[in-house]
Amino acid sequence: MAGAARNPRERYREQVREEIKAHAWTQVSTTGASALSLNAIAKQMGISGPALYRYFRNRDELITELVLDAYRDLTDACRSAARAQDSPAVRLTAVATAIRRWALAHPHRYLLIYGTPVPGYIAPPAATAIIESLMSIILDAFTDLTAPTNADSTRSGATAGAIRDAAAGLDAHLAADQQWAADHPATVRRRALSFWTRVHGVVSLEVAGHFTGMGFDPGLLYVAEVDAVVSTPG
Amino acid sequence: MAGAARNPRERYREQVREEIKAHAWTQVSTTGASALSLNAIAKQMGISGPALYRYFRNRDELITELVLDAYRDLTDACRSAARAQDSPAVRLTAVATAIRRWALAHPHRYLLIYGTPVPGYIAPPAATAIIESLMSIILDAFTDLTAPTNADSTRSGATAGAIRDAAAGLDAHLAADQQWAADHPATVRRRALSFWTRVHGVVSLEVAGHFTGMGFDPGLLYVAEVDAVVSTPG
DNA sequence: TGTACATCAGTGAACGCGCGTTCACTGATGTAC
DNA sequence: TGTACATCAGTGAACGCGCGTTCACTGATGTAC
């Protein structure tokens, strides 16, 4: 995307960069991100170590590229999942499914973004921009979900007083806060945050293997968690 | 607990082991678990590297000890939080608060357990036993919560059909499954799983710093998420 | 079309460093008679 | 109470290894006249 390689040399450059990143990914998946070794990548490619410095200034720049690729890949998956659906509720479920599918298909990619931060490494600002565009998919869907049924979203109801209190408290806090996603109403932001944390609650535990041996299907738990926030009015 | 040091030599041994672990923790918090270095610990203690092999067979055994300590510490925090409360709903909130407090107080401890798995390292079976005792605190609380209001936990209700469907589907699946926590009814297990994933959804994102810069209070989101599963009937 | 020049991919040696782990050892500490 | 012996904490040298990064270089590839 950032400039289709014009001359042959640039084309080749881009090609080798991709090959390096591919080998980097297989290494991240086996050794972990913090143990990523440039020399090992070079050896796998049948190339001398210093040759890599033609393509990446140093180790940190390579990791940054991997992180950005992962962010882009996840966001693309969500965008195309959302595009296919008209109904906002179905769209949200589709996005949730896309996230889990993506995470299970590329656990190392997921963990590089949402796992333990690589010590000493600071995520590039570009990553924030990408993740914001992902969040806006979710925010927009919740906006669409709230708009038509605006009339019957009454906030009383005798059932379950405590949950309403806590949610109302969060709403009030978000209404006063103008930093994040200020162009969306507080209720929409609250539901988007709820969606986001429930998604990662199930997925991160599943990817890290904390459900293994328990013998139930995490997919059903996932659907239940996501549906609860999508289908609950308010 | 595992045998109070009898003679002076054992007492000293235990003491040095603890000192090594303390230095290991400060190193994990700065460098990350996968970069834990025995030689660096020794240097910090003013001791030669090989001396550590008197106290731990190798690097893996030290990490195992750290993991077990973290599991024990978290479980103890939850147990004492639960002990103070009679009402099951309040008890669950107290446990949730204890988990978040503990995670924020010891981010590296939390991430060692629930973050990216250390590559090549397999969690010891003893850890599973500890985490099961933690889960039983939550399972018992949900059992107490369900028991008295057993009569009015009707499964119909016109509101929010989708959420009921997904939850009911998970219930049916859990009822058929006899592996995990088979001594508790499916509904209780479903709610415990929901509680567990919501807790980690908020906490893991918060600890990894994914809320920084968004400008809202994660504590309020946390309370809302936990209250939603504690206060929702069924 | 052919030649001269600039660009740039890749090499190999070298830098200083740290790692986990083993081994044979010294010297202090506790124990048994 | 004093001595002989066993136990064990800790040392220093050594093992082979891999790391990120720099440097001066060779040789191929593309460009300009």
Image (cartoon, coloured by chain):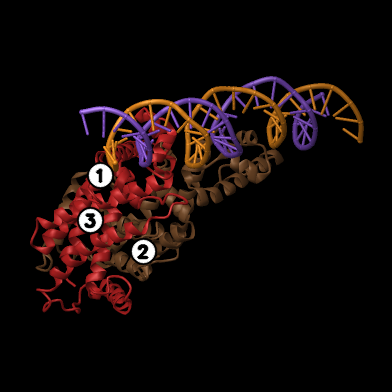
Chain colours: A red, B brown, C purple, D orange
Q: CA distance from mark 3 to mark 2?
A: 32 Å
**Which mark identifies residue B211?**
2
Task: Confirm or deny contact between disc 1 and disc 2 (CB under 8 A).
Answer: no
Which percent across, then down, holds residue A190?
A: 26, 70
Chain that bears disc 3: B
- Dot 2 lies on which element? loop
Q: Are marks 3 and 2 on the same chain?
A: yes
Which percent across, then down, holds residue B126?
A: 44, 40
Vertical comparison of B144 with B48: above or below = below
Left or right, residue B229 beside residue B135: left
Which percent across, then down, holds residue D18?
A: 47, 31
Chain that bears disc 2: B
**Which mark identifies residue B187?**
3
Residue under circle 1?
A104
Which corner quadrant of the image does residue C10 belong to?
top left
Tell which of B70 and B204 is nearer to you: B204
Q: CA distance from mark 3 to mark 1?
A: 27 Å
Tag 1: amino acid: Leu
Which percent across, then down, holds residue A197?
A: 29, 60
Tag 2: amino acid: Phe
Q: Residues within 10 Å of mark 1 (few under 14, many from 20)?
A: some
- Dot 3 lies on which element? helix
Q: Is residue A17 visible?
A: yes
